[in-house]
Amino acid sequence: MTIDEVLNMMRQGMGKLPPAIEKAAVVDPALVMEHARSKGFAMPADKPALDEQTRTLVYLAAALAGSSTGCVQAMANKIAQQGIPADKVLETVHIVRLAMASKIIGDADPVLAVMMPKA
C-alpha cells in the first residue's frame, strides 16, 4: 500500500484526516504507515470480535480518558459518519467520567489513609 492509499482509507473511515496525520504524512510517511498497520493489529478486518460502532465507542472512551483531543475529534467525525445514536455516545461519555472519577478516588488512597481516625 502507498501512503496515498492509506490516507484515502483513513479519509473514507473518518470523513476527514486528523490534522496530525496530515502533517505526519508529509514529515514522516513511515509513521503513518506504521499507524495504519497498528490499526489492523488492534482492529482486525477478518473475524472481528466487536462491531464497528462498538470499536468507535471504545476508541472514543480511550481517547477521552487519555486526553487525546485529536483522537476525540477523529472519533466525533467517525460517530457522525457512522450515525451512532446519541444515547450510546452519551453513555460512553458517562462511563468514562465515572472511570476517571474512580481513578481520582483510587489515587487519593494515601491521602485518605493519613486522615483515617486512629484506633
Image: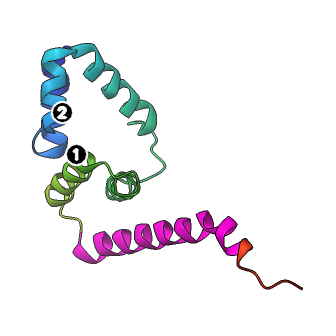
Q: Where 45 sits versus 56, above or below?
A: above
Residue drawn at (13%, 36%) of the image: 19
The amino acid type of the residue labelled 1 equals Gly
Q: Quadrant of residue 41?
A: top left
Asked if 111 appears above or below 28 in the picture, the reply is: below
Which residue in the protein does label 1 denote? 70
Q: Which is nearer the eye, 10 or 19?
A: 19
Percent position (x, y) of residue 53? 32, 58
Q: Percent x, y for residue 76? A: 19, 57
Q: Bounds of the magenta span?
A: 85-113
Residue 91 located within the stretch drawn in magenta: yes
Q: Quadrant of residue 105?
A: bottom right
Query: How many labels, in total?
Result: 2
Disc 2: CA contacts within 10 A as few (<14), some (14-19) or many (>=20): few
- Spatial CA distance of label 1 from label 2 is 8 Å
Name the residue located 84 percent from the left edge and 83 percent from the top edge.
118
Whether the residues at callouts 1 and 2 have beta carbons within 8 Å, the answer is yes
Q: Residue at x 22, y 45 (%)?
A: 70
Report if residue 1 is visible in the image: no
* Residue 57 within the segment the image draws in magenta: no
Q: How far from the left and from the top, in percent, is residue 77? A: 15, 53
In the image: residue 70, left or right of residue 108: left
Label 2 sits on residue: 20
In percent of the image, x 17 and y 16: which residue is there?
A: 27
Residue farthest to the left? 16
From the image, which quarter does the C terminus lie in?
Answer: bottom right
Q: Quadrant of the N terminus?
A: top left
